[in-house]
Amino acid sequence: MRGKTRIALCAFAMAAILASALALMSCASKGERLGGKAPDGESSATAGLPLRLAPGEVGEYHGERLDPASSIPEVSIKGPVEVDIASYRLVVDGLVARPLSLRYAEALALPQAEKVITLHCVEGWTATALWSGPLLEAIIGAAGPLPAADTVIFTSADGYSTSLPLADVLQRHLILATRINGIDLPAARGFPFMVAAEDKWGYKWAKWVTGIRLSDDPSYKGTWEEEGYNINGDEGGPRWESPPPLPERGAQ
């Protein structure tokens, strides 16, 4: 009888250990979509891991180490999106004088920039990369923002949305990134365009961007803001607009 009891206890202990291991393994791939609470500190997405660069991808820029594109956890709301670039259009509308519907090549023809920027996820990990693409100020300028416009709303191919103050977009010279570390954004990481929302929490980094709408509604709430995340999304600032619900739901 004692032998059977020991076997049962061992089996229970092994099951508990296995469950804990699986939970830790799933955190990087599902973490924020399923609501893991953000740890107090931050760590690189590649901390302790060897670099696994894609062909042509650079791992260092002017002496600064970069995290590979493949290291950034997949935390979208519906999973990766494959965008048909032949039929793709970037629509710029709202409070603008000249609404635009830009083909991918047309968007790339606008003035571009590149910056090393660190993406800070509210879950606690970071990813530092070289982001490059058209300047959002060039795209918005081509559409002619009206004086009443003070908010930029981004919409994505998967139904995601978020917003940024127009003043932040212009003053920070934010990039609508199409390349990371010298290669095209992988489809799973947001191709053709991802908002490189410098100094903002990761849920402001909209991926698979299809729409840029100028608005006069600074209180606009996107996908995660509707769940209570802070509208401004300043990295280092409060994560929540109001006390978080229980259990806490996560965003990037």
Image (cartoon, rainbow, N blue to C red):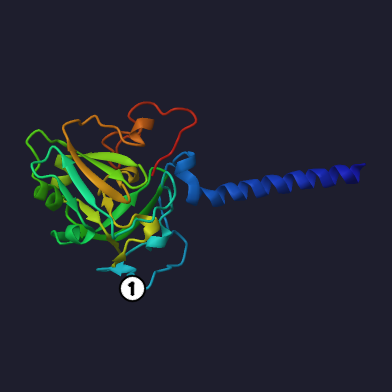
Quarter of the image for residue 130 reads bottom left
The three-letter amino acid code for the residue at tag 1 is: Gly
Q: Residue at x 13, y 37 (%)?
A: 95
Query: Residue farthest to the bottom?
Result: 56
Q: Residue at x 42, y 56 (%)?
A: 45
Q: Could you tell me residue 6's position as x and y percent?
A: 84, 45
Judge the density around disc 1: few (<14), some (14-19), many (≥20) Cα neighbours within 10 Å. Answer: few
The residue nearer to you, when weighing 53 against 78, is: 78
Q: Could you tell me residue 147's position as x and y percent?
A: 6, 36
Question: Which element carries disc 1, helix, strand or loop?
Answer: loop
Q: Could you tell me residue 103's position as x and y percent?
A: 21, 57
Query: Residue farthest to the front?
Result: 87
Q: Could you tell me residue 119's position as x and y percent?
A: 32, 51
Q: Is residue 80 visible?
A: yes
Q: Residue at x 48, y 28 (%)?
A: 246
Q: Is residue 228 visible?
A: no
How many marks do you count on the picture? Answer: 1
Q: Residue at x 17, y 54 (%)?
A: 135
Quarter of the image for residue 146 reads top left
Compared with 244, 132 (above or below) is below
Quadrant of the rendering where the N terminus is positioned? top right
Residue hosting label 1: 56
Quadrant of the rendering where the C terminus is positioned? top left
